[in-house]
Amino acid sequence: MIEQHLLLKRVDFIFVQDTDWEKILQKSIQRPKQELINELISSELKGRGGAGFPTGLKWKLTSEVESDEKYVICNADEGEPGTFKDREILTRVPYKVLTAMAVCGFIVGAKNGIIYLRGEYKFLEKPLNEAINEFSYFCKKINLDFTVKIFMGSGAYICGEETALFESLEGKRGEPRNKPPYPSISGYRKKPTVINNVETLAHTYTIFKYGAKKFYDLGVQYSRGSKLFSISGDTPKPGIYELELGMSLSDFVDEFGDGDTKAVQVGGASGFLVPRKKFHETAIGYQGKLVGISLPTGGSMMLFNSSRSMYNLLDNYLEFFREESCGQCTPCRIGCQQLLAGIKAVKKGERPAPYLNKLLKLSETMQFTAKCGLGQSVANSFASIVENFREEMIY
Amino acid sequence: MSETIHITINGIAVEVEENTVILDAAKKVNVVIPTLCYHQDICVAGNCRVCLVEVTGQKRLAAACATPCEEGMDILTNSLKVRNCRKHIIELLLSEHNSDCTKCYKNGKCELQLLASEYKIMTQDFIELYKEKHHTIDNFSPSIVKDDSKCIRCQRCVRTCEELQGVNALAVAYKGHEMKISTFYEKSMNDVVCTNCGQCVNRCPTGALVEKNYIEEVWDAISNPDLHVVVQTAPAVRIGLGEELGYKVGTRVTGKMVAALKRLGFDAVLDTDFTADLTIMEEGSELLNRLKKVLVDKDTTVALPMATSCSPGWIKYIEHMYPEYLPNLSTCKSPQQMFGALLKTYYAKVRNIDPKKIVSVSVMPCTAKKFEAARPEMLGSGYRDVDYVLTTRELAIMIKQAGIDFVQLEEMEFDRLMGESTGAAVIFGVTGGVMEAALRTAYELVTGREIPFKNLVVQPIRGMEGVRMSSIKIENTLEAWRFLEGVELKFAIVHGLTNAKKAMDMIKTGTADFHFLEVMACPGGCLGGGGQPIPTNYEIRKKRAAAIYAEDMGKPIRKSHENPEVIKIYNDFLGKPLGELSHKLLHTTYQLRERT
């Protein structure tokens, strides 16, 4: 057993309603910028969209670049299959996100904030705009030069990738850019840009309110704080839960499973499928010095019981990726097509079972060579499903 | 001051300037990294992933074309990981590509084929995807054939059309597995804003975009004893053709080209340069005429600046994009079309041949010329001016098919009667050349003196900058041109349609003060035309330009108005520039086109 794993612990920071946002904003912008950055760095908050880049460092880097035009962008293009937390944050506590954006703007020297809202969340546009109006009124009152606008996405999964999102914002096709340069130097309109997930911004609000320590004290090494989980699939209690990071998957399944959990998909279609035999050795958090496997996640947790076919699951994911790849780079565009066509061919007996090995090699190539995170992460679900449920792929 | 960065590539230490990409650093130590989507003329895309290299310590491979070197990088370009991944990428591209190589027009010249051959991709393990995609071939355009089944989505064409030409006829459509390069509403290339310039063809690594070839039609005509088949060759062909036939870039092969054309069986081998000289007479007169109307007659209906009209890509561009400025275009046909019209009238008369039996073939550095030849306006003689247009590349193919050992050929001269030309005509093939030729003649016509530049080289308007402007003051004019006394004649030269847009926007906003505008649709002018040998880049175009200028210097006559055949045709046939017959045969009209 792994001692470092935490027991499942529910916490409640993000959705707790408070009326302090005006105070917190006013207080924050009177603090030295460096102090705010240090606070964020010492909290060890990492990006909650899934990639896990240290948030404090991101803000610090952008603050250090000289430019009279900078941007703060809230990535609300929540498109990962099985994720539905950001819409809830924007519905219930939008002022936390807006406050965080303004503080970020104050720190890095940006006057403009943009919320890139997923096309399917059109229904959120109106209430969110009302919240923005109220927020802007207060900003004006305290002489804070910061405006926020909503930009509606058009439904492409790839636009959640930060540089594709910039292209989309600029009115172009949502295709990821070459990196470097990174957004902190050249982002939206080629200007220094902080781009954060909705939830990340909401956590910074918690940190500015209660201080870094309270956040840092939650979680384990390398995976500090709490995280929202979107729990779905074969579970008696689907929904959104804020949990401390670092729990073991067995505890998680004990709490949320239906007693017959066969596998859990951690991190959506671009994440990993963990089979029952590995629940006990898997922790949810960022990879660190924990014993065993540690899986990061944007918060999507899909549970599957024994009635589910893992072949169908993979088929479904691959169809999704084949469709949602932007299509520009070779490994992702053609690789996704080949993986899907390949497992179909094996299933139908048109290719021998060892062809799966060739496909595994291909998925590895995609991981090494694709231009952005989309193509790079297809291998996660592909390899974890094929390796753990090989017989289901063949028979 | 930019910093120096120290890296190693395959163990070899390299020093590079800050922001140098790995691809360029590798070149410094003679390490070749294969590329497909990369092209020197356009922005970096980094999407084919063929140029991936391993940076020690990094899990993911880096695209050499797009990744700047960082201090201390240890780069491997041929590690096992790189080889395996690169082979995978090529295999993937082949699985989506219609690999019927032996039946492909680009067979032997396809960059993907070359790469597959280098990496010895002998098997096709992956599932052939292109078969399920039901691609169609768009061959409705008289200039360009687009075959999506050959496309590898490198987007070179898209970037070319956008960055170099500002036309955006080609763009990326759909996403994921359906992603493809397409046109507005997926219309045919013939029905959209495409100017047929062929710059995409010049940069397409595969057979997805090629010129529509008329090789068999021309062979048929040559083989028919009842037909009199005449060929004309444009100025830029003679300095490009050698590249396809074993010569270094920038080699002049005029005499060998003429000899080869004769061996192919053409009944007469003539020179478009002859009508280039004639164009100067007509267009120069037209400009002076317009200036007179504006300066003396105060005629406000006359459009200035006047723009050149020899580049058919430019003509179609302005018809689509700035139709309100069509009156600014010179009404002169291009030299190709003037030649064709005279071939079936003047030439037919002098040589006593039934024009119905004359087949007019041209060899051009250009794909848009194919479209131009098919325009309904080009029937002034009662016949189609030009029947078939071949590109420089197609001519090279015919020479090879005919088994001609080009390098060993004895040089020959053009046939007479529309075969004589001057140095002024040769420089039509380079950006600024039409302007320079026009100045050599117009200045002398107006002042009675040679243009005041050493060796007639009007240096201020030469070069490769996209937009160039200059002026010349006209003083001590002859009596007939007194109205031009003291006038500072201003002119602008642009090449590449993105630059043409700049000039047109100056005109549109009223900030243009020039009288005469030369536009060539292609970068570098005709020498960088869509029908010229592949590859092309800045260095190649500069070498071709040098060859053209050398050809000019080597000519005994270097001013259009001194071409004896031009003098003779005015005496014997046309009468005078802008005369009635000129108007009928050598001038044309334009049409308004939609922006689709």
Image: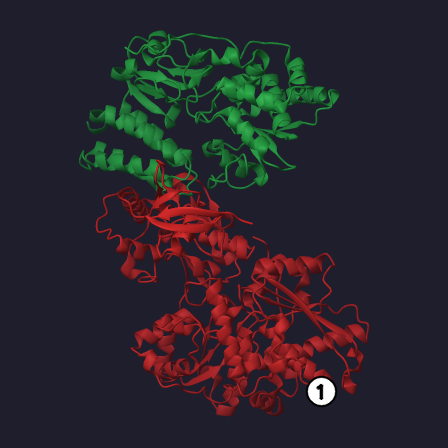
**In the depicted structure, whether residue A163 falls above or below residue B384:** above
Chain the render paints red: B
Colour mapping used in the image: by chain
* Total number of numbered discs in the rendering: 1
* Residue B172 picture location, percent across and down: 47, 46
**In the depicted structure, whether residue B25 falls above or below residue B294:** above
User: Residue sitting at 30 percent across and 35 percent down?
Assistant: A363
User: In this figure, which residue is indicated by the disc labeled 1?
Assistant: B448
Residue A375 visible in the displayed image: yes
Chain the render paints green: A
User: Residue sitting at 43 percent across and 85 percent down?
Assistant: B268
A299 sits to left or right of B484: left
User: Residue sitting at 39 percent across and 82 percent down?
Assistant: B256
* Residue B448 picture location, percent across and down: 71, 87
Residue B593 visible in the displayed image: no
Q: Nearer the viewer, residue A302 or A211?
A: A211
**In the depicted structure, whether residue B30 falls above or below residue B482:** above
Q: Nearer the viewer, residue B503 or A220?
A: A220
Q: Quadrant of residue A205?
A: top right
